[in-house]
Image (cartoon, rainbow, N blue to C red):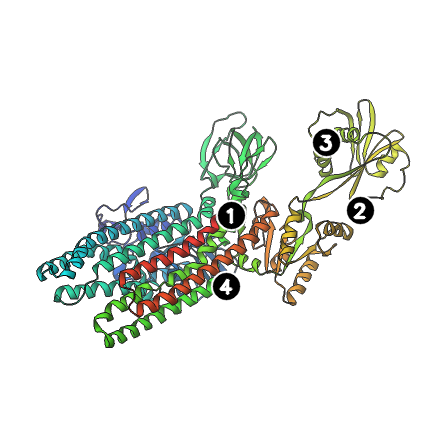
Amino acid sequence: MNAVLQPSACFHCGLPVPGGSSWHVTIDDVPRAMCCPGCEAVAQTIVDIGQSAYYRDRDEYAVNAADATMVPPELRLYSNDDAQFARDASSCEATLSVEGIRCAACVWLIERQLTRLPGVQAASLNVATERLYVRWSRAECEPGDILQAVRQVGYTAYPYDAVRHGERLQKASKTLGRQLFVAGLSMMQVMMYVAPAYLAAEDGTLDDSMASLMRWASLLLTLPAICYSAMPFFQGAWASLRARTLGMDVPVALGILAAFFGSVVATFTGRGEVYYDSATMFIFLLLCSRYFELQARRKAASALERLQHALPASASLMAGFPDNRATTLVPAGSLAVGDVILVKPGEAIAADSVIIEGTSALDLSLLTGESAAQRRKMGERVPGGAINASAALILRVLKPARESTLSDLLKLIERAGSGKPQIAQWADKVAAWFVLGLLLFAVAVFAFWSWHDPSQAWPVAIAVLVVSCPCALSLATPTALAAATDSLLRRGVLIVQPHVLETLHRATHIVFDKTGTLTLGRPVLKQIEGLDGMTEDACLQVAAALEAGSAHPLAQAILLAAGEQARAHAEHLQEVQGQGLEGVVEGVRYRLGNAAFVAAIAGPPLGDTAVGMQGMTPLYLGTQGRWLTRFLLSDALRPEASDVVAYFQRRGKQVVLLSGDQEALTQSVATELGINTACGECLPDEKLDFVQQLQATGAVVAMVGDGINDAAVLSGADVSFAMGSGAALAQAHADTVLLSSQLVSVLDTAKTAARSMRIIRENLGWATLYNLTAIPAAALGYLNPWLSGVGMAASSAVVIANALRLRKV
């Protein structure tokens, strides 16, 4: 049946393909022309999900705009059974890219449309990233219903893909740039005719025929701006009206149309004022504002975009290793556990692996925020998404690419930005009512001036419509939050939930776990106690010689304390599981381990072996008939722990320490850090009970834990932070993941939260003050239409520029 389809038409919907069109999709290895980016996006998605047979089997084109009320059958190809939509037995979820977002009004319109759809449980569109998160009931809704609902209000949505999303953003930016250029050109040409007319009108030297000629010339020069450059405003307003809502493009579109058609009437009749210069000028100025807003959103989401493009699409497989070192380029998704891959300098590692040959420096900045490269050698593990910075490495794959560290991080990012804090929801509601109030006010103003001074009624009403700035009100919060989130992500802090900055700023209690959070989570040598005259350094070197080949955490602490000095070689080493080591160093037999193990060679212990330990782990060194020394090891505090605790205390927060470790050790750490409230030997459910008791008294609790055994309390706190670690990322229950695993990131987040709330208040205050001042001024006739356009553009620019200050580290 495909033979009847016209080859010159759009392969998807059948409408004519515009001349010079670059839209196309490869279907069954044949490039097919498309009439618009919407058809291109839908067709590409159909191919991507393996449903190319739709085009082979169809007997008619897909529904186009000529019959937009019908449900396009291609949208029904999506099913709840698709793995990309799976969530649990009763519901599905998806992250979609949405085309055509122009401002915060689009966000409100799309969310409102979806929440009306039966079965949709949640819908949240992030204006900065242009991604839509939707959760729906399997029994009541299908993915096609959601895509169709978005389509009905004038937008195109498809499952998120980083590459396609980036290409679409680039196209949208170019289109907006062309519209801005045409508007600017029209404005300048119209001003060339209008300026002499203004000057000549003052001294009466301009006759009627010349004035009429200039008006007609201005009309022709204004048409490109109206018919092409102003289309984003008309499309946005029409989408709002179709959905029976009043979006923020409605007053702008009305103002443009009123100025233009009022001028057209005056041109044809030869009576009244024309406003071609005002119309072209505020189209240009509003497009400037929208262009800067678009660039600001892209900058605010840049860190997320870098992560989403970082996972490599292919890998060099060494199928015959070690006998054959030839490589084959394969898709990264096809890698299996045990495969051997070659990673050249400058390439990203496709999957979590272990180095089996080579030594190199790895750039982990995308994963941890740490800019300095880290050395990795044979036998060490490397995370997927890290970039090989120096020498070639041969790796053995430990996990498939879809389970790599970066993939786990991207799963968290899918959750990030999928909601809005309360302050943003409030701003959206106010902006929606603001538009309705503005239209009613404009009608009242027009009626008043029609009675008071009819010649001023039209320009004053236009000025009122144009000067208002609901966009500034709606942009005040999301732009600031997006910029702050981007800044934190570049420093290794991933904000997963939308309320983090707002809630952290008003938190009253900061609760810390101990092990792995305030401490490093690994033992270090704290003290050496000599027992029989041998120097501490000599004892340490002997212990290091005995421990040189051990991977035990206590052994690593001894080796770290001994440093890289030349060590004696230990011979005849014997390890007794759970007790210690025995070996010969420079002809002398030594034992290193617990007191009972060393006593078998050194004799009865000297005094109480428990004295002075204070919760630390003792390790004894002895030789025949002699106790030489005692090493005391414990989990060390993070270097920044004291500064972080002191910061919150200075700001009036109550700092609490909850730990599962011994009570004595917990109190020791609390005393060292100046924490007044500390509880040791707490089980996970006891930690949760403690936090809930605080919340019952009205406290707002922030919890900082290691994210592994603190899942319950992290979920129960008002806002929570998990120390990031590769395997634990996907299981994180926290609102925020500290990818750098540095406690100082909590302090950075708190400072950024304070700055964000301050800037949001500044933006909301400015937007409110501007509208309260500018709208009455326009209503009283103090502002003409073109000056109103300047004011609106400037108001949005102020809000955006102020918000982007948060991107500075």
Q: Amino acid at mark 3?
A: Ala
190 relative to 370, above or below: below
Q: Amino acid at mark 1?
A: Leu
Whole-angstrom CA distance, mark 3 to mark 1, is 37 Å
In the picture provided, is 538 more to the left or to the right than 210? Answer: right
Q: Which residue is mark 1?
A: 489
Whole-angstrom CA distance, mark 1 to mark 4, is 22 Å
Q: Earlier in the sequence, mark 1 or mark 4?
A: 4
Q: Earlier in the sequence, mark 2 or mark 4?
A: 4
Q: Position of residue 782 (x, y in %)?
A: 29, 66
**Occupied quadrant, residue 438:** bottom left
Q: Which residue is mark 3?
A: 562
Label 4 near label 3: C-beta < 8 Å? no
Q: Earlier in the sequence, mark 3 or mark 1?
A: 1
206 relative to 344, above or below: below
Q: Amino acid at mark 2?
A: Gln
Q: Position of residue 558 (x, y in %)?
A: 73, 34
Q: Amino acid at mark 4?
A: Gln
In the picture provided, is 121 more to the left or to the right than 33? Answer: right
> Which residue does the image show at 38% across and 47% down from the upper left?
164
Q: Which residue is mark 2?
A: 614
> Which residue does the image show at 51% across and 30% down from the upper left?
390
Whole-angstrom CA distance, mark 2 to mark 4, is 47 Å
